[in-house]
Image: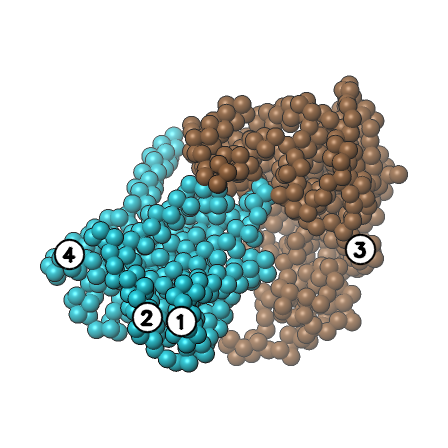
Amino acid sequence: MADQTILELTDISKHFPGVIALDRVNFSLQKGEVHGIVGMNGAGKSTLMNIIGGVIQPDSGVIRINGQMKQLTNPAEAQKLGIAFIHQELSLFPNLDLASNIFIYSLPRQLPGFVDDRKLEHWAQSVLERVGLGHLKPKQKVSTLSPGEKQLVEIARCLAQEAKILVFDEPTSSLTGRETETLFGIIRELKDQDVSIIYVSHRLEEVFKICDRVTVLRDGKRVDTVRTNAISRHDLVKMILGHEAADTAHISRREFDSVLFKAVGIRRGAVLQDISLEIRRGEILGLAGILGSGRTELGRSLFGLDRIDAGEIWIDGRKVRIRSPQDAIKNGIAFITENRREEGLLANKPVVDNIVLANLRAYASLLGWMHRSQEIRAAEQQKEKLNIATPTVRRLVMYLSGGNQQKVVLGKWLETSSRVWIMDEPTRGIDVGAKEEVYRLIRAIADQGAAVIFISSEISEVARFSDRVLVMRKGKVAGSFEAGTFTAESILIAATEGVS
Amino acid sequence: MTTDRQLQIGSQGGLFLHQLSQIALRYGIYLVLLVLCFAVGTIEPSFFTLQNLSTLLLESTSVGIIAVGMTFVIIARGIDVSVGAIVALASAAGITSIKLGGQPWWVGVLIMLGVGLVVGWINGFSSSRLGMPSFLVTLATMTVARGLVTAVSGGRIWYDLPNIFQGLGMGHVGPIPNSVAIMLIAFLVGYLILSKTLFGRQVYAVGTNPDTARVSGIDVERTVLLTFVLVGLLSSLSSLVLTARMNTFTASMGTGYEFSAIAAVVIGGTSLMGGQGNMGGTIVGVLIMAVINNALNLIGVDAYYQDIIRGSIIFLAVFLDAIRQRYIESA
């Protein structure tokens, strides 16, 4: 096979306010190649993919497709040039049949406004065969398919648009083992048909299995591009983390008291399979895992937001029943959700209304009469204590910066005097300075005797900040590390490959 | 450099306009009421007579009482179109039990209140715990209730109710007719519950963002259910006031009340998207609707033109709500 470059990016840079997302990154894709892209969260993978997809434009740098300089000013432009995305969250219409889904962008017309059904079915059949779904009927509804089949239909749709470059972003996160194998088979066949594939994944074993070459990104820079058969897994992990991070283990010198929070045998469908954990007073337990590992689901289940099938929760040596957030709050559990705006805040209400929200009854008389002055005073105190940058507590939360919004969420739970804190991505979407402040606040909460579960997709953050670490993978505990026994590297390996 | 400065001035100008529009959106409604009264008074001087103003208020009472409860429902992201049918069914059941069943007046009143409680509870339970869309739930209960009205009353019209009803309908508290006094009390209590109590806070929280409310330990389903029970009970109260004032039961009672009550609440600035609004706005909304109805009658506009005008006003109110929402989102 003669090497023929279909896509070439040269010196691509992209700045966002306060961040250099990409710094003179080079990338090239050969015809018929499967090219992996790996890196930690924030390494610049998404930004790079968004540039290739025409969603955002680079500040500088050159994009060549088949040797010709192109500007990808919008997604439609990229699509026209043969670049197609297979989305993580499927973008099919469940109530339409396969054929219509595949040709939704270019339905064959008969008379103006009428679809030529015969032609549509015929076309669809041939595309379905290309992705190994020849046994399905084009008239079948998408909702009858399994997640794996749906993904293949999505690929079929891209092929129907004559895509030459397919971009996969974590394609196996919702697939079973067998479906993953099928997908890999199809990817190999597409390769033989000279389709080029960009494969973004956290799962290193898959990268080694399917990719010809892999590009490693770290902190917005390209570390290197290597052939997968010329590098060991260990070296790849080192490249992803950067050498410094790998050799310094976080050593917690703290002494902890008795166990405050204990969960035993938590089960919820296939999402959580027999999870147990213990946290002592003053301790921060890091909970790591890649997307779809069940880390967020565990947090939600412990807080009573999702119903569990089995399992016990003990607080302070007492078994408690938690079926709803009300139960959880009554038992002194606080929950900081991963999506602040959607579940953490009343965005178009004042700061004060948010701060008192989880403990409204404390500001009301027996008959339910609210004492507004007490609410204001409580909010003022939290504003002072947490250093929330707002002229007044009557300001609407949506006008605050991300970091200050997160402090409002923290303040809300501080008002409840909770002893068990579940924090899901507490530093997501806030700038570096505010991040340090949030870390300090979390540590202060733990130091006052609380048990903290710190859930994060940023492995370096978990490694640096936790006293102990639990790693989840596909709904199970994939690794458990005592203080001083973990590094970012060992966590990453456990999260992506599983260790005993 | 220049572009930077232009940008800054531009955004400041934008901010000013934004603030102006916010003020207009917040207080404009009071202005509208004043201008409207003034305009009607100019065209038809008899508008400002004591006689007319008292008629105007009297006729707004039934819808006004319901609008108090509707404000809660809509702030919590629901809607209730069964209120007019509850008015009719409560009266049908209560009065029939007195006239045909020979029950004392107070049993009839309790039955009237019971009807609102039960229908309100069904509406609330279905829209919250069963997760059904409240518009369709209440459309269904409205239809069932209207059917029951005919079944219960057998198509009869009842006059000559017990004296106690007449006393309630005709009596005064000082210079104020009883039904107006009841409406004012409903507004006052509604205002206090909505803006000064735990339940009021919960209603606003649920309407602003039910997911955040749930995570913060608020029983979202219970809160929504209670708003429907409240509007059901107030519909019964409205039925009692209307029946007493007319000293009559007819099967067509309360027709179109759902429409007028929702319109009054929305005109008063309560957003159909939930979380925004207050009782003061609803009072003004009820008065605006009352003044318009009164004016149309004073000036002698044909009935079908009246409907066209009323419909257009609702359209305008919802349109303004949509614009307001866009302002909030773009902020």
Mark pair 1, 4: CA separation: 36 Å
Between circles 1 and 3, the one closer to the viewer is: 1
Q: Residue at x 55, y 36 (%)?
A: A359
Alpha-carbon neighbours of circle 2 within 10 Å: few (<14), some, or many (≥20)? some
| Image quadrant where one finds the C terminus of chain B | top left
Identify the subunit bearing mark 2: B
Can the viewer see residue A5 in this picture? no
Distance from the alpha carbon under mark 2 to that under mark 3: 73 Å
For the colour brown, the matching chain is A
Q: Which amino acid type is marked by label 2? A: Leu
Task: Determine crowd level at label 1: few under 14, some 14-19, many 20+ residues with C-alpha closer than 10 A.
Answer: some
In the picture, measured across the screen, residue A412 lies left or right of residue A420, that is left
Q: Residue at x 88, y 38 (%)?
A: A500
Q: Where the N terminus of chain B falls, by quadrant?
A: top left
Answer with mark 1 or mark 4, whichever residue precedes in sequence. Answer: 4
Tag 3 residue: A176
| Amino acid found under the numbered disc labelled 1 | Ile
Q: Which residue is mark 1?
A: B98
For residue A445, side relative to residue B100 (left or right) = right
Q: In cyan, which chain?
A: B
Task: Say which of marks 4 and 3 sits in front.
Answer: 4
Residue B302, above or below B277 = below
Mark 4 = which residue? B50
Q: Position of residue B276 (x, y in %)?
A: 42, 48
Q: Amino acid at mark 3?
A: Thr
Mark 1 touches mark 2? (CB < 8 Å): yes
Which SS class for mark 1? helix
Secondary structure at badge 2 equals: loop
**The disc label shown at residue B161, or none:** 2
